Image (spheres, rainbow, N blue to C red):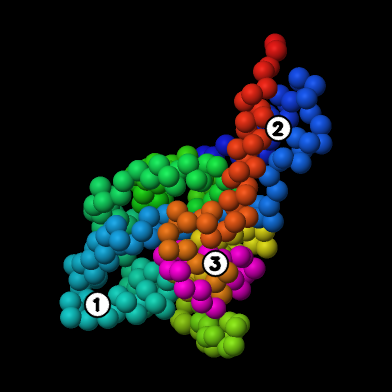
Amino acid sequence: MATGYSFKCLQTLFLFVLIQNGLYNMEYENKLPESKYECLLFDVDDTLYPLSSGLSVECTKNIKEYMVDRLDIEESKVPEMCARLYTDYGTTMAGLRALGYDFDHDDYHRFVHGRLPYEYLQPDAYLRSLLNSLPIRKVIFSNANEAHVAEVLGRLGLEDCFDDVICFETLNTQNQTTDAPIPTTSVVGDSLEPVGLVPTSPIVCKPSENAFQLAFKMANINPHETLFFDDSIRNIQTAKLTGLSTVLVGSSQRKSGVDYALESIHNIKEALPELGELVNKSKDVRKIAIETPVEA
C-alpha cells in the first residue's frame, strides 16, 4: 500500500519552479535535506500511540478470551500461556500455531482486533505534522492484520503519512514458506550473542529475522540506511542484527541493541537532532518554492 507523496517528487517540483524562473543555483541545491537514512520504518501498536491508551490491554483480553472460547484451552492456564507464547514468538497467534492449534487467521483477527474500542485513540495532529515534515520515505512494519493497521492509522489521522505498509497479510501469503526458527539472544558485554532457538511457527512475524528480510525485500529497504522504531526490545534486538539503526519507543533507557530510546514518538526531533535538522531544512526548501512565482 503506497499512500505518501514522496519527497523526491517534491524535490523535483521545487527544482522545476526554480529552473523555470532562472533562480536555480548551488545555493538552493545545498539547502536540500540530506541524511544517512533513506527510510524510516515504524511499528504501529504502542509505538505510534502510547501504551497508556489502554488499547493493548483490551487486545490481550480478547486474545485470552479467544483461547478459552474458540480453542477450548483451560482458563486457568491461559494467562501464563499467553504471556509465554508472546515472549517466545512475538505474537500469541504465532505461538498457538507453533503448538499445533489450527484456526482461521481471519476469524482470529476479527475476534481479537475487530472488537477493540478504537475510540480510545484520538487524532494526533502533532505526530501527523512531524511525520509529514520529515523528508524521508516512511514505511509501516506491523505484525497486525491490514484492517487493524488501517483502523489505527485512520483514528490517529495518519492514514496518508506512509509510503508503504508491511503487515500480517503481506508477510503471510498462501505460498509463504514456513518461518525459520527464531534466534534468542543474550547480552555479552555490549554486544548481542545468539544463545538458542525456539520451535518454528507457520506464522511469519517479528522478531524473526526472516520477517525482517521479507519486509526489506517487499518494501525495497536497505537496512543499513534505515531507522527502525518499535516498542519491543526483542524486535529491536533482531533489527539491530539485520543492520538497521534502532529506536526503542516507550522508554528512555537504552539497552543492548538500542541506538536511541524515546519515551514518546513525539520526541523524535529532540532525541535525534539529525532528523530535527532535516525538518528545518525541508521547511526552508518549501519556503523557497512557495515564495517563487511561476509565470505561465
Front residue of this view, candidates 187 and 109: 187
Mark 2: give few (<14), some (14-19) or many (20+) Cα within 10 Å: few
Residue behind mark 1: 79
Q: State left or right for residue 32 relative to residue 76.
A: right
The amino acid beneath tag 3 is: Tyr
The amino acid beneath tag 2 is: Thr
Marked residue nearer the N-terminal end (3 or 1): 1
Front residue of this view, candidates 36 and 273: 273
Above or below, 176 relative to 187: above
Judged from the image, the secondary structure of the residue bearing numbered disc 2 is helix
Q: Which residues are magenta?
A: 237-256
Marked residue nearer the N-terminal end (2 or 1): 2
Mark 2 or mark 1: which is in front? 2
| Residue drawn 23% across the image and 66% down it | 61
Instruction: Count the marks.
Output: 3
Residue behind mark 3: 260
Front residue of this view, candidates 73 and 212: 212
Mark 3: give few (<14), some (14-19) or many (20+) Cα within 10 Å: many
Judged from the image, the secondary structure of the residue bearing numbered disc 1 is helix
3D distance between C-alphas at marks 3 and 2: 32 Å
Labels 3 & 1 near each other (Cβ < 8 A) = no
Question: Residue 126: x and y, percent?
Answer: 43, 45
Marked residue nearer the N-terminal end (3 or 2): 2
Residue behind mark 2: 12
Question: Residue 45: x and y, percent?
Answer: 39, 58
The amino acid beneath tag 1 is: Pro
Q: Residue furthest top?
A: 296
3D distance between C-alphas at marks 3 and 1: 32 Å
Judged from the image, the secondary structure of the residue bearing numbered disc 3 is strand
Is residue 230 in the magenta section?
Answer: no
Question: Residue 171: x and y, percent?
Answer: 50, 59
| Residue drawn 67% across the image and 29% down it | 288
